[in-house]
């Protein structure tokens, strides 16, 4: 495609040059041409040099100028393959140049084929970045906006795009908590805030079901630039733009990949010998005689030896989980067009299997997209976009993976006892493993335990008309309508089975229990629609070649509706029919719900730039939400940002190593309206019960007091930044410093009012938080011989503190130290300070402290128990001895390192990313894996 653009540009330039020369030619030019020709013939008798000119991606540069240094009349241009041939003097130098690229001078060597790589001249490029409701040249951006292109997003075959963003963009915090196919998306936040607003081609939605190959770019608005989205932009905005067609011949792209996915580090449960030893130690250290312990030392040794068939050590993990699961991704796209019409089409298929060993389930996704741009007349153009996504999630219902991963690992894999056999002599009977689901082998097999199937269908249509005004240059009117329908059907069928133990001496089977869930069927359906209407005037014009003014004025309305239906039955006589009518009608249950939300907005933006040197941007958005009472529905969100590109100043011109040096300042306000739905109305709960006389009557119960004053959360953010590029991007990057205050956070006064208050209190705009931090990015790009490189790293820090938190007035200093929130960081963990283990009874007897939870009596303590530090020195271990021992689960520090190398047609990309200063609590109580119920890492 790039070749086609180059050919077109070359042809246009050539025609323009011939026309200009023919129009301006003088009679005495012809003799000069003849002299130049004779000179060229003379040079051809010397050395003929051949070579190829390519860009950093190895693509040929068509129409590049190749001139002998010092002899401007001796030159040529590269052909459609980027190849040239030129006769020059011995040891001559060549000047090679092309529009938008840095000119290079190379030494010629007779008989050697040259390969010259041209680098893009960043100062010469008018690269654009996607911002709210439009695009803007990077040179004039004054807000904190980061962008990543498709080349970095689609570099690895991942099913979920959110997992590719970690470490790529400063300020973006990415945390993946699940690896379940179809539910393995990473939670994202910007600068440690809550979940951001995500916009895909103008529609607020998730992008976890979009293929990376569909995406053109991802932009992140982190400061006042997000104010243009007003009520929903308080936590920042992520903008996803999909690919569109370009003027070129039809280009077909095919991608296909097969990947193996596996768990990098999974804890294994204890062996039979370890569990037996733990049970014996627990018994003895509890003061019981060793003679009556559950296991003897001889029995424990038999578990270790593994030679006695009565002393088993079954590996339920290996029987249920495989090391690797396959993933496939296949897609094809076509794009092209001309001045009248451009088109882009895409079809992709992705499938992932779970790591469960047998019939463990899968996730399938189909993506279809069609984007068309047409020019109806010289001044009227239209766009028509269609997107369809189908997802199928199919899992085993016994593993309960959708509801909770903890249930899967703790209650199933870790709790299963290795002392029971994997199989029984009678294959028609299932072996018991001492878990409520019977055994992991049963629960992880959808044919045995049942299944959960969920099918999502998403259809989105976007149509737009744009008119360019004839008599007002730069003014355009645009109307856009976006409609989206998102529906799903879910079916959960659970099968109950019986589990046995076997006595080899008597050849008898004993029924121990049935699996915990009776045979049941639950079916649910949901249908959600959203309609967005946007009508705008856009203005973009440059005056006197120095003053650039652009503006946007828009009206937007959003209407959302949702319907849900659910039905279930139990009491199935047989599992052969997984339909509702096959269940017991007396167990039938059903439910439904619906909702509707609306929003209207007025949006304005004005940008001014003088010679790309001084820049200012102002934004004002007004939103009205149906969630709030009249008089509190409108929110107004302004923003202003300033930019100064010092590199364009006259006094900086003498510093020729400075490519770009821009200072940015911004202030913006935004909001968040999802604080409560219609909390200004008195609500009621249905199906409450009243006793009237001796009768139980169903009726309505008030849900609490209304609050007509409830309104938006408000965010105010201050940002200062600098962008720099030196020595033709041999050193480049940016730095950001920010402070955000979030006020009006909803809460109730349950902490500051007595519990004797006679009603459920309403939600109020009570609490406030401030967040501060910084971001740094540093990179270098260039080439060493035939190897082109781009190496960059980024680091960011943020942490939040409560400005105000509704809480009681503490009078006890220890209570204030441990429980007070106002003025303190939001992510603190308190606990006791571990001081080792008791190693002997003598150490316990000599310990000068007691546990308050043990009634200050240490007689029950045994060697191996934990001891804690007495921080206040009163000799009693209680809540007053706790202190801050950890942070939250979201990292304060995020870092990323990107490495991109290119050698001819080969490239190497690597990404390293991580987070620092976070703590995760692991609950290890399931399956007697360890004696501690949880630990902090």
Image (cartoon, rainbow, N blue to C red):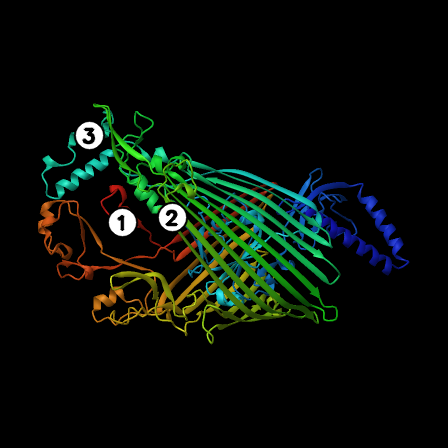
Q: In this view, does 387 lie to the left or right of 896?
A: right
**Tag of residue 934:** 1
Residue 333 placement: quadrant: top right
> Marks 3 and 2, how far apart in space?
54 Å
Q: Do the residues labelled 1 and 2 touch (CB within 8 Å)?
A: no
What's the residue at 19%, 30% (across, down)? 301
52 is higher (above) or lower (below) than 135? above
Q: Name the residue under label 3.
A: 301
What's the residue at 23%, 28% (across, down)? 311
Can residue 62 be seen in the rendering of this structure? Answer: yes
Residue 554 placed where, x, y %?
A: 60, 69
What's the residue at 30%, 66% (across, down)? 821
Which SS class for mark 2? loop
Q: Name the residue under label 2.
A: 588
Residue 113 placed where, x, y %?
A: 69, 39
Residue 41 placement: quadrant: top right
Which SS class for mark 1? strand
Q: Reading the chain from its start, which is encountered first: label 3 or label 2?
A: 3
Quick one: label 1, few (<14), some, or many (20+) residues within 10 Å?
few
Residue 852 placed where, x, y %?
A: 14, 57
């Amino acid at each position: 495609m790039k070749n086609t653009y180059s050919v077109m540009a070359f042809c246009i330039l050539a025609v323009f040059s011939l026309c200009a020369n023919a129009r301006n030619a003088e009679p005495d030019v012809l003799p000069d041409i003849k002299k130049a020709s004779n000179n060229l013939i003379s040079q051809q008798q010397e050395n003929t040099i051949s070579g190829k000119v390519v860009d950093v991606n190895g693509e040929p540069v068509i129409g590049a100028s190749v001139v002998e240094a010092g002899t401007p009349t001796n030159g040529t241009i590269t052909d459609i393959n980027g190849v040239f041939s030129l006769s020059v003097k011995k040891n001559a130098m060549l000047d090679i140049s092309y529009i938008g690229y840095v000119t290079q001078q190379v030494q010629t060597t007779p008989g050697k084929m040259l390969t010259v790589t041209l680098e893009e001249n960043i100062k010469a490029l008018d690269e654009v970045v996607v911002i709210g409701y439009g695009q803007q040249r990077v040179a004039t951006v004054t807000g904190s906006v980061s962008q990543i292109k498709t080349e970095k997003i689609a570099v690895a075959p991942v099913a979920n795009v959110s997992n590719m963003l970690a470490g790529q963009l400063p300020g973006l915090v990415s945390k993946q908590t699940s690896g379940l196919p179809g539910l393995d998306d990473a939670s994202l936040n910007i600068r440690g805030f809550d979940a951001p607003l995500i916009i895909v081609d103008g529609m607020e939605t998730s992008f976890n079901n979009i293929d990376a190959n569909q995406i053109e770019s991802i932009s992140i608005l982190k400061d006042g630039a997000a104010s243009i989205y007003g009520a929903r932009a308080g936590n920042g905005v992520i903008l996803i733009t999909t690919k569109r067609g370009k003027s070129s011949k039809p280009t077909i792209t095919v991608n296909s990949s097969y990947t193996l996915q596996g768990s990098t580090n999974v804890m294994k449960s204890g062996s039979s010998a370890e569990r037996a030893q733990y049970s014996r130690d627990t018994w003895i250290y509890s003061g019981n005689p060793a003679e009556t312990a559950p296991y003897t030392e001889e029995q424990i040794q038999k578990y270790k030896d593994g030679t006695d068939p009565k002393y088993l050590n079954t590996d339920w993990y290996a029987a249920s989980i495989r090391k690797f699961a396959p993933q496939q991704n296949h897609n094809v796209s076509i794009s092209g067009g001309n001045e009248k019409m451009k088109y882009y089409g895409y079809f992709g298929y992705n499938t992932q299997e779970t790591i469960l060993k047998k019939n463990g389930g899968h996730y399938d996704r189909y993506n279809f997209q069609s984007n068309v741009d047409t020019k109806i007349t010289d001044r009227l153009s239209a766009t028509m976009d269609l997107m369809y996504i189908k997802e199928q999630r199919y899992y085993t219902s016994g593993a309960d993976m959708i509801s909770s991963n903890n249930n899967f690992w703790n209650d199933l894999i870790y709790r299963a006892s290795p002392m029971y056999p994997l199989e029984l002599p009678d294959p028609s009977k299932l072996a018991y493993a001492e878990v409520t689901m019977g055994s992991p082998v049963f629960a992880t097999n959808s044919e045995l335990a049942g299944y959960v199937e969920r099918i999502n269908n998403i259809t989105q249509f976007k149509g737009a008309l744009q008119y360019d005004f004839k008599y007002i240059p730069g003014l355009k009117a645009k109307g856009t309508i976006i409609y989206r329908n998102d529906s799903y059907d879910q079916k959960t069928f659970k099968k109950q089975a019986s589990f046995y133990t076997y006595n080899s001496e008597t050849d008898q089977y004993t029924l121990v229990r049935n699996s915990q869930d009776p045979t049941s069927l639950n079916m649910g359906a949901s249908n959600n629609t959203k309609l967005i209407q946007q009508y705008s005037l856009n203005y973009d014009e440059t005056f006197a070649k120095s003053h650039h003014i652009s503006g946007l004025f828009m009206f937007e309305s959003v209407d959302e509706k949702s319907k849900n239906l659910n039905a279930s039955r139990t009491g199935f006589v047989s599992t052969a029919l997984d339909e509702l009518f096959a269940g017991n009608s007396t167990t039938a249950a059903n439910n439904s719900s619906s909702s509707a939300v609306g929003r209207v907005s007025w949006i304005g933006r004005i940008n001014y730039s003088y010679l790309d040197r001084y820049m200012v941007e102002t934004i004002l958005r007004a939103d009205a939400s149906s969630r709030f009472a009249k008089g509190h529905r409108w929110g107004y969100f302004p923003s202003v940002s300033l930019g100064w590109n010092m590199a364009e100043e006259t006094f900086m011109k003498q510093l020729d190593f400075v490519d770009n040096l821009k200072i940015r300042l911004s202030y913006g306000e935004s909001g968040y309206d999802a604080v409560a739905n219609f909390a200004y109305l008195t609500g009621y709960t249905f199906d409450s019960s009243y006793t009237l006389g001796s009768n139980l009557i169903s009726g309505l119960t008030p849900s609490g007091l209304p609050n007509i004053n409830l309104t938006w959360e408000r965010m105010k953010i201050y940002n200062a930044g600098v962008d720099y590029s030196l020595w033709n991007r041999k050193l480049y990057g940016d730095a950001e410093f920010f402070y955000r205050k979030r006020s009006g956070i909803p809460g109730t006064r349950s902490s500051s009012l007595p519990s004797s208050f006679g009603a459920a209190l309403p939600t109020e705009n009570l609490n406030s938080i401030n967040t501060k931090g910084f971001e740094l990015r540093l990179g270098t790009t260039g080439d060493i011989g035939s190897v082109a490189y781009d190496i960059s790293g980024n680091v960011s820090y943020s942490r939040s503190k409560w400005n105000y938190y509704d809480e009681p007035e503490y009078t006890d200093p220890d209570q204030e130290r441990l429980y007070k929130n106002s003025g303190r960081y939001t992510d603190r963990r308190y606990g006791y300070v571990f001081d080792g283990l008791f190693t002997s009874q003598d150490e316990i007897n000599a310990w000068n402290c007691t546990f308050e939870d043990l009634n200050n009596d240490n007689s029950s303590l045994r060697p191996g128990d934990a001891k804690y530090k007495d921080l206040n020195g009163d000799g009693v271990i209680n809540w007053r001895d706790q202190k801050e021992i950890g942070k939250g689960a979201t990292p304060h520090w995020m870092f990323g390192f990107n490495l991109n190398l290119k050698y001819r047609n080969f490239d190497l990309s690597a990404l390293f990313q991580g987070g620092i200063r976070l703590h995760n609590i692991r609950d290890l109580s399931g399956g007697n894996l360890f004696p501690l119920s949880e630990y902090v890492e």
